[in-house]
Amino acid sequence: MKKIVQKTFLSLIALSAIESALALDSGTQNLTAIEGATDYFKINCAGDTDHLNFKLFEGVANNSVVETPAIPPQLFNAKLTKLKLTSTVSAIEAGTTKEITLKGGNGAYTLTLDTFGTNLSVKTAQTYAVQYQCLNTKGNVTKGSSTLTKSGIESVKKTLANNKTAKYSITCAKDAKNGNTSSLVVKLINKTAIIKPATSSSSTQAMLSAPSGDLTAQVIKAATAKNTTGVAIDIQNGSGNYDVLVNSPTNKALPYHFEYSCLNTKNVEAKTSPFQLLQDQ
């Protein structure tokens, strides 16, 4: 009797149907061709679990090339000031260029750069360059000077460490040809190397796998049981141990894999322990 229950119970291995809300756990096993062959698992859902979501697939899992979460960017911010006038631009990410403009007329401007808000886990200092021009009301170039670089010429590459600040003075003056300055325009080029997410061939299962055909599974929690022949099992019975049985009615030797996740009432991943293989046939 126990063997029959275990046979029907096998279709355990379920994956959460709500891909965006959960992190999947998974496993790969092989069912032998002996009569009544059954694999028996136990999954423990802890925390605020409301239900277990599970799916079984025949065949060996297709290993997907999975991108790890993107590394938070390195960035810097800029502020251009002249007396009580201020213009700012924030979150200039690696590999991007932004401009900042301040209509302050002739005189000395202060350009302040900082790296506040950047990703502190990346220790490499950021690399940047600056280019500026003083312009009249018609957009024609007027006279500009700075120890940073010459007007209209991109500066040499500079570095700025995390949580640090750099200040530069830029002076705009009346030009013999184009008259008085109306505004200062500064181009900010973040030349920091872009950190790309790493890729790896992991055991994360491809979602294109075909559902089970010859295999069946059953998930049991206390007195509640649900069966599957390839669709997701969703059994709502709170936290605790969920038993899973996988078997083959045709007594074929079949490899299979499964995916499962413990979810709370909002379909958000709750704490899930690795599955325990209690019987392997």
Image (cartoon, helix red, strand yellow):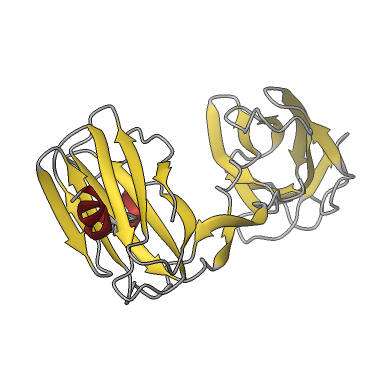
* Residue 30 is at least partly visible in this image: yes
* Residue 16 is at least partly visible in this image: no
Q: Position of residue 139 (x, y in %)?
A: 65, 60
- Of residues 189 and 100, the one nearer the viewer is 189
Q: Hey, which quadrant is residue 33 in on the image? A: bottom left
Q: Position of residue 23 (x, y in %)?
A: 40, 46
- Could you tell me which quadrant the C terminus lies in? bottom left
- Of residues 135 and 227, the one nearer the viewer is 227
Q: Residue at x 55, y 37 (%)?
A: 88
Number of marks in the rendered image: 0
Q: Position of residue 140 (x, y in %)?
A: 70, 60
In the picture provided, is 175 more to the left or to the right than 106?
right
Against 281, is 275 above or below? above
Against 185, is 48 above or below? above
Q: Residue at x 40, y 34 (%)?
A: 273
- Of residues 41 and 190, the one nearer the viewer is 41
In the picture provided, is 267 more to the left or to the right than 56?
left
Against 245, is 206 above or below? below
Q: Residue furthest left?
A: 223
Against 159, is 214 above or below? below
In the picture provided, is 147 more to the left or to the right than 130?
right
